[in-house]
Image (tube, rainbow, N blue to C red):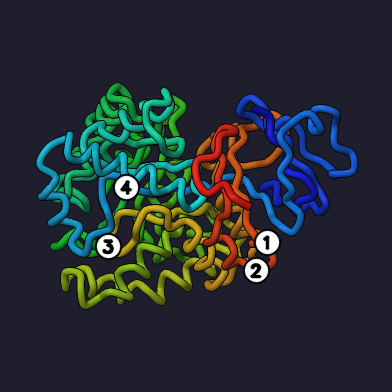
Amino acid sequence: MATYFANATVFDGRRLLTKAGVLTSNGTIAWVGPHARAPREAHAARELDAAGKTLTPGLIDCHVHLCFDGSADFAAEAREAVNDTVVAVKAILNAARQLQHGVTTVRDLGGRNNVVCEVGRAIDRGQLVGPRVLAAGRALTITGGHGHNVGFAREVDGPDAVRKAVREEIRAGATAIKVIATGGVLTPGITYDFTAFTPEEMAAAVDEAHKWSRVIGAHAIGPAGILVAVRAGVDSIEHGSMLTAEGARLMKELGTFHVPTISAIRGMVENAGEIPAYAAEKAVALSDVARDAFRRSVRAGVRLACGTDAGTPFNPHGNAPHEIVSMVEWGMTPLKAMQSATSGAAELLRMPNVGMLVEGRAADLVVYDDDPVEQIEAVTKPTLVMKAGEVVAGGSF
């Protein structure tokens, strides 16, 4: 059924339009423009009076882990995931939660086996309710590297083995690739600034991923590991907590995206007494450094995309609106922050069908009572969420 949103403020993914209308039909955006010039088809559609409300594209979270719930002890939760069936149920529930918060597309960057790949396929077939899912399957880490102990990464060493691992994840259904370029916060016995893959290994991963037209993101916290990943040509740096001026300049030059995952740091720092001591110590040490790195990215003109790392401690699914608010609190303008979760994120993920309210794209949109571009906290309170032209959350004006 065609739906026409009348007389709204519209953030189309790049700019604001006032007194505008949006027509959806057959799962796509059929028309966007001044309400006073609405086409004949709009008059025949079901009309919703959106005066005083703001429409935006469906939000995109470029970094989630649907297999995890955000429990205090990430490793303990992984140990309790005894088989793929248990993990699949968790991923299905977490995917549905994303929609309630206006998130209609996610990129999953590491889970048990190919569970999330299959959940994403089931959503695409209409068998499950959830956002569009770009899934990396298992992340790639070195032997003993970050993530080896929690079941979302496979250990692999050497350029040829890395290349084969990329192929095997794609064969298993991966629509994205994730490499772990440095140590991390949630793995004991390894510092967060440890550099993992060699330049040759990283180059092999990037080359193979791009051969298969897969977007590749690199978990990278330490400055040396960031440079290895950026020079190899990864599409995004995930976290980037210790990004230097040199790294920011190189990312700007090569067009590498920065996905800062502020929510992950905040979740752990604000609950430091409830997470494992080794993780709390590392998270607290990184907090101010990560904020400085984020601001360095903004100043350098690095492209930023919204990603939460949802599933890490005290970082629940559906947290993208709060990530957007945090990006503004750390120094981004509301307009740029909203772009990072819509048109910018779609560009990173190479998904030209989402991220903007323009004719021909998927009818993924969110309605808010207030304008997030003017009052960023409004993004945390969606009134209606639509995916492919169907209302999937909220619905009453």
Nearest to viewer (mark 1 / mark 3) = 1
Left or right of 10, for residue 43: right
Q: Is residue 330 above or below residue 230?
A: below
Q: Can see residue 283?
A: yes
Residue at the image point whose x is 89% and y is 43% from the top: 36
Please report contact status of discs 3 and 2: CB closer than 8 Å, yes or no: no
| 1 or 3: tag closer to the N-terminus | 3
Please report contact status of discs 2 and 4: CB closer than 8 Å, yes or no: no
Left or right of 195, for residue 108: right
**Looking at this view, is 229 or 146 the one in front?**
146
Residue to which mark 3 is pinned: 313
Please report contact status of discs 1 and 3: CB closer than 8 Å, yes or no: no
Residue furthest toward the right?
36
Residue to which mark 1 is pinned: 371
Nearest to viewer (mark 3 / mark 2) = 2
The residue type indicated by label 3 comes to Pro
The residue type indicated by label 4 comes to His
| Kind of element beneath mark 3 | loop
Residue to which mark 2 is pinned: 375
| Kind of element beneath mark 1 | loop
The residue type indicated by label 2 comes to Gln
| Kind of element beneath mark 4 | loop
Residue to which mark 4 is pinned: 65
Left or right of 244, for residue 78: left
Residue at the image point whose x is 68% and y is 61% from the top: 371
Few, some or many residues within 10 Å of mark 3 (<14, 14–19, 20+): many
Few, some or many residues within 10 Å of mark 1 (<14, 14–19, 20+): many
Q: CA distance from mark 2 to mark 4?
A: 29 Å
Q: CA distance from mark 2 to mark 1?
A: 6 Å
